[in-house]
Amino acid sequence: MKKNTVAIVEDEEDIANLIAIYLEKSGFACYKFQRASSFLDYIKYNVPDVVILDLMLPDADGLDICRAIRREKRYDNTAIIILTAKSEEVDRVLGLEMGADDYVVKPFSPRELVARVKAVLRRIKTKDEEGAFINIANILFIDKNRMEVTVGDEKIELTPTEFKILLILAEKRGWVFSREKLLEMLWGHEKDTCRRAIDVHIANLRRKLKKAGRFIKSIKGVGYKLET
């Protein structure tokens, strides 16, 4: 099983080593950075599961690092735990407003820190799993991660294009999508595909979805929507 990775951005070597010892005993893979610059080089090519971030680094403000991470969508599922000697409420609030998931004040218990790392990972996993499934009227179920669709207890085999059309409609239930908009969302402006292709895919979707096919509504002269 792949280990969760933790990036420890802490300029005090003894503290970083202590954190790493406890986390590694709990099954985490740890990477230590004493400067913001080396950490930023690392995350150009790696996406850690958790960042333990000291605010007072020799070459950068930890809050600026936190803000930079949160600006990048690729780190949406990376948890940030701020670790600092600053204990004032205003500092904690500022850190959380910058996108941190938790805030630990020095001196701290290494065991408590490990517990907090596990807690933020559970929250992210739960959030991710909740967003991975779409339930339409307790009849049509879409698993986005596995690209699986079931109607009742029956698994439905869809082509990748059919699945994407269904997902577009299901994620914005009640919204009307024109044929042109669906074509753009499927292929951008790179593929020369006629509007009629959408009608064919929709017809195939309705047939394959059987009783759930009725949820896909035609809006005359415009396009399609999914509605129960």
Image (cartoon, rainbow, N blue to C red):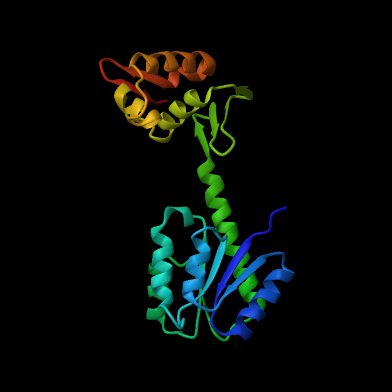
In the depicted view, which residue is nearer to us: 217 or 68?
68
Q: Quadrant of residue 168?
A: top left
In the depicted view, which residue is nearer to us: 226 or 99?
99
- Left or right, 39 with respect to 13, comes to left
The answer to whether residue 33 is above or below residue 171 is below
Q: Position of residue 109 (x, y in %)?
A: 63, 81
Please tell me which residue is depicted at 47% across the width and 53% down the height of the picture.
74
In the depicted view, which residue is nearer to us: 140 or 63?
63
Please tell me which residue is depicted at 55% across the width and 22% down the height of the picture.
158
The answer to whether residue 181 is above or below residue 109 is above
The answer to whether residue 180 is above or below residue 28 is above
Please tell me which residue is depicted at 41% across the width and 57% down the height of the picture.
72
Q: Quadrant of the C terminus?
A: top left
Q: Position of residue 214 (x, y in %)?
A: 44, 17
Residue 22 in view in this figure: yes
Residue 101 in view in this figure: no
The answer to whether residue 120 is above or below residue 180 is below
> Farthest residue in the left direction?
221
Q: Quadrant of residue 145?
A: top right
Please tell me which residue is depicted at 52% across the width and 59% down the height of the picture.
78
- Left or right, 163 with respect to 4, comes to left
Q: Position of residue 182 (x, y in %)?
A: 35, 26
Q: Position of residue 9 (x, y in %)?
A: 53, 74
- Left or right, 28 with respect to 58, comes to right
